[in-house]
Amino acid sequence: MLYLMRDAYDQLLSPMRVAAEMARTVCENPFSPLAYAPSSRAVAASCELFERATRTYAKPAFDLGVPERVVWERPFCRVIAFGEPSTKPKLLLVAPLSGHYATLLRGTVAAFLETHQVFITDWADAKKVPLSDGRFDLDDYVDYCIAMFTALGPDLHVAAVCQPSVPVLAAIARMEAVDHPLVPRSAVLIGGPIDTRRSPTAVNRLPQERNIGWFERHCIHTVPWTHQGQGRSVYPGFLQLAGFISMNLDRHHTAQWDMFNHLVQGDGDSAAKHREFYDEYLAVMDLTAEYYLQTVETVFIEHCLPKGEMRHRGEPVDLGAIRRCALMAIEGEKDDITGIGQTRAALELTSNLPDGKKAYHLQSGAGHYGVFNGSRFRAEIVPKIVAFMATQGEAPIQLPPPESASIAVRGAEPRLEVPATLIADSVVAARTLAAELHA
C-alpha cells in the first residue's frame, strides 16, 4: 500500500510540477516582461527547486563520449563495455547494488578508459523485472559474478566498489576452491564491508540494533500494478533515498539553500554542478527483497564471511582457498559508511595468498565517495590500482583434472551442477568471446 500511495502522490504532484516549470520559464525568458521584475530570479529559483524536489529521477546515462556495447546479459544485470574492442587489459567494475544506478561510477569508468578495456555491471531496477524472471538473492549475485568472470576471462581484472566486495570475494573463493581456470588475475576491493565488526559506523550499528524481522516488516513492500515487476517484493528505492538523505540531512538542506542563492545570483556554473550531482544522487532503484534481507543478515548481522560461516548453494565460502587471484584493499580515512579495517580484513582472511599478491592503501582525507571518484581518486588512487594490476602478469591457463571439482551456479534458469569436465568448455567459450572483444 505504501508503494501505491507513493506513486499516487507522484502523479498528484505532476500538474503542479508542470505549472512550476511554466512559471519558471515566464520568469527567465528574456522576451517576458516578468523576467525583469525584481523578484523574478527568486520566483524562478523557487519553482525549479520545487520541481526538482518532487520529481522522480530517471536512470541517468553514462554519456562518456565513447561507444557502449552490451557483452553479457541476464534478467537482473547486464555488462556494458566502453569504447571500441582493444588489446588493453580487461577491467570489470562491479558496481554496487545498493540503491543507486551503475552510473554513479561514471567517473570511475572514465579514470580507467586510457589504460584498460573497461566493463561495468549495469544492475536492473527490480520493479522493472517481471516476476516470471524469477528471484534474485545473494547466492544469485555470486552466481552472476562467476558467470561474468568466466565470460570475460581469461586475464580479467576486477574492481568491486563497496557492497559487491563481499559477493565478488565469495565468487573468487568458490572458483578457487574448484580450481576454476578463469579466476580473475586480480581483484581490487574499494571501501567494501568485508568485516563490519571493525570500526563500526552508523550504517553498521543499525542492523546490530535490530533483527532481520524488523527489516522485513519495515523495509519490504510489494511493487504495484503500475510497474512491470508488479507483485515482486522489494526494498523500494524511495525508502533507500530517504535513508541516504537522513544520514546527512543538514548537509543536503544547506546544499539546496546554496542552490537557491546560486540561481538568484545568476551563478550558472555552481548551479549546473548542483544539478549534475543531484540528478545522479536522487536517481534510485529497487532491490529484490530476498537479496536485501539475505545481505543484511549475512554481512551486517551475522558477519558470516569473516567468521568462515558463509555458504553459497550449500557449499562453504573458504577464503583460505584463494591462492591465485591477487587482492588489493582500498579504504578512506574519513569513510563514514565502511570504517577503517573493514576492507583490509580481506587481506588477513586470505591466509594462503602470498604476501606478494596483496596490497593495501589508506587514502588520507577521503570519505566513502572519495575512494572511487573525484580528483583525489584520479590523482592518487588510480595510479596505485593500475600499477598493482600491472604486476599481475598473464599466466598459462591450467585445466584441472576432469573429476576434481564441481561448482553450483544459478542464473535465470534452474540451478545446475556444473562438473569440472564442462569447465574446459567454458574456457573455449571465454576465449571466443575474448577474441570477439579484441576483434
Image (cartoon, rainbow, N blue to C red):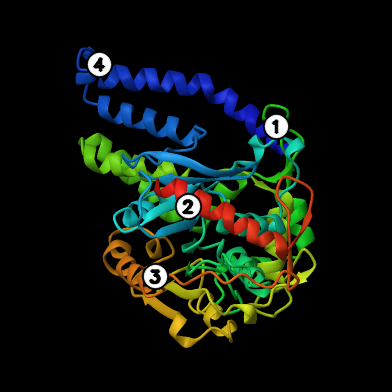
Three-letter amino acid code of the residue under disc 3: Met
Q: Whole-percent x and y of residue 62? A: 40, 41
Three-letter amino acid code of the residue under disc 2: Ala
- N-term mark: 4 or 3: 4
Q: Are marks 2 and 3 in contact (CB under 8 Å)?
A: no
The answer to whether residue 5 is left or right of residue 23 is: right
Mark 1 to mark 3 CA distance (whole Å) = 47 Å
Q: Whole-percent x and y of residue 305? A: 67, 74
Q: Which mark is residue 319?
A: none
Mark 2 to mark 1 CA distance (whole Å) = 45 Å
Q: Quadrant of the C terminus?
A: top left
**Which residue carries the number 4 mark?**
34
Mark 4 to mark 2 CA distance (whole Å) = 61 Å
Mark 4 to mark 1 CA distance (whole Å) = 39 Å
Q: Whole-percent x and y of residue 71? A: 51, 44
The answer to whether residue 332 is left or right of residue 137 is: left
Three-letter amino acid code of the residue under disc 1: Leu
Three-letter amino acid code of the residue under disc 4: Leu
Between circles 2 and 1, the one closer to the viewer is 2
Query: Looking at the picture, does residue 103 appear above or below residue 41?
Result: below
- N-term mark: 1 or 3: 1
Q: Are marks 4 and 1 in contact (CB under 8 Å)?
A: no
- N-term mark: 4 or 1: 1
Between circles 1 and 3, the one closer to the viewer is 3
**Which residue carries the number 1 mark?**
4
**Which residue carries the number 2 mark?**
434
Count neighbours of disc 4 (C-alpha within 10 A) and say few if under 14, some if 14 to 19, many if 20 or more.
Answer: some
> Which residue is rendered at x = 41% and y = 22% of the image?
20
Q: Nearer the viewer, residue 417 or 423?
A: 423
Between circles 4 and 3, the one closer to the viewer is 3
**Which residue carries the number 3 mark?**
389
